[in-house]
Amino acid sequence: MSMRRIDRILRLIKCLLSGQCWSLKSLCGELEVSRRTIFRDLAVLRQAGLTYYVDRERNGLVIERIPKVRNFNLNIQEAMALLLILRANGLTKIIPYGAAAQSAARKLESSLPEPLALQCKKLLQNTELNFGPMSDVESISGLLARLLGVAAERRKVEVTYEASSGIDEITTALHIYKLVFMRRSWYAIGYSELHQTTRTIKVERILDVVVLDGSFVADPQFTLDRYLGSAWQMLRGDQQHHVVIYFAPWAADEIDAVAWHPTQQTRPQNNGAITLEVDVDGLDEIVWWVLGFGNGARVLEPPELREMIKEHIRAMRTMYS
């Protein structure tokens, strides 16, 4: 089966599961195919166990039966972990199937043996996961599902995306190695034929995707850890810097309690303050993080980072004067 057809069938499934009643005519228009093609694709769904019927009152197709995952035994820790993640506040804004995750949580709870279900309910009633502000994945859920499909099949795609400047548009053939959720958004990481190197593209900036003929062979040396190196978060610079930052007592507890970076070392000071030392590739990301602590953070090393902080302070002073 071609990737183009797989992509179309995934879109067909999404339409039928949306809750909207789709007529054959509306499906043909949505998927831009003939009635004959729609019938062939529906036959594939029926063979896979996903059946449908015609609702004559609403004049459209309705999913009749969705294949179920077989039950499996869970202990209390496994059930708790799954329920805590599936019920997390904001999960629907992170993954493309967030609504399905909420539905899965309800089904999981109802299928647990009563003693286990009651224990989980008691433990979870005062527990909450909140991921904080982040991009809303709903607007790109279809695009994400499509990119996941081509990445799994190792198919080349031509992507047109908005440059970070917000002015230019860039088109390149891309070999997608990874789809990663970081810093509140989804990113596609892969080899760009235009740039002849591995690039990171924010999925929300992608304007168009065309599946190309031919596949690619992933770089066997590529790993996410190797690609990111010792970046503060995800923007890796060309040079590694040893960074030392002094944090005032009011910020010391937060600094000491969080694993900010794999290389970090903290040193308590006599006055309740703390110094943080890290080795990072590039300074562009960490400068914004330091500024977020205001006068509670003072960069001691390196001089380049101190100058970057000073430049921002001067610019802010001018802006507010």
Image (cartoon, helix red, strand yellow):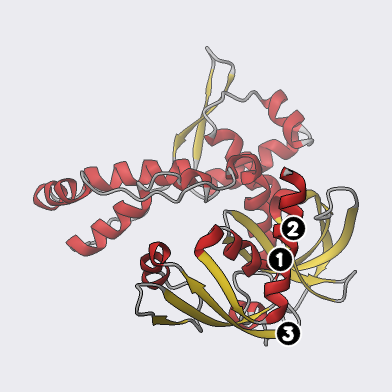
- Which amino acid does the dot numbered 3 rest on? Gln
| Relative to 159, 303 lies left or right | left
- Quick check: 135 left or right of 273? right
| Label 2 crowd bin: few (<14), some (14–19), many (20+), radius 10 Å | few
Going 36% across and 70% down the picture, which residue do you hit? 257
Q: In which quarter of the image is residue 266?
A: bottom left
Packing grade of label 1 (10 A; few <14, some 14-19, many >=20) is: few
Foreground disc of the pair 1, 3:
1
Percent x, y for residue 150?
70, 61
Residue 145 in picture, x, y percent from top left: 62, 51
Rendered view: 320 above or below 29 = below
Q: Is residue 201 visible?
A: yes
| Count of numbered circles on the image | 3
Q: Which residue is tagged 2?
A: 314
**Viewer-side residue, 54 vs 11:** 11
Q: What element carries label 2?
A: helix
Question: Mark 1 touching mark 2, by CB under 8 A?
Answer: yes
Decide which of tag 1 and tag 3 comes sooner along the chain: 3
* Quadrant, the N terminus: bottom right
Rendered location of residue 144, percent (x, y): 64, 52
For the point 35% across and 72% down, the residue is 272
Residue 214 appears at what percent x and percent y?
82, 69
| Image-based side of 179 in relation to 50, left or right | right
Identify the amino acid type marked 2.
Arg
Residue drawn 59% across the image and 16% down it = 59
Q: How far apart are marks 3 and 2 (CA)?
A: 25 Å
Q: Tell me the mark number nearer the camera, choosing from 3 and 2.
A: 2
The disc, 3 or 2, on the residue closer to the chain's N-terminal end is 3
Which residue has dot 3 on it? 239
Residue where numbered disc 1 is placed: 310
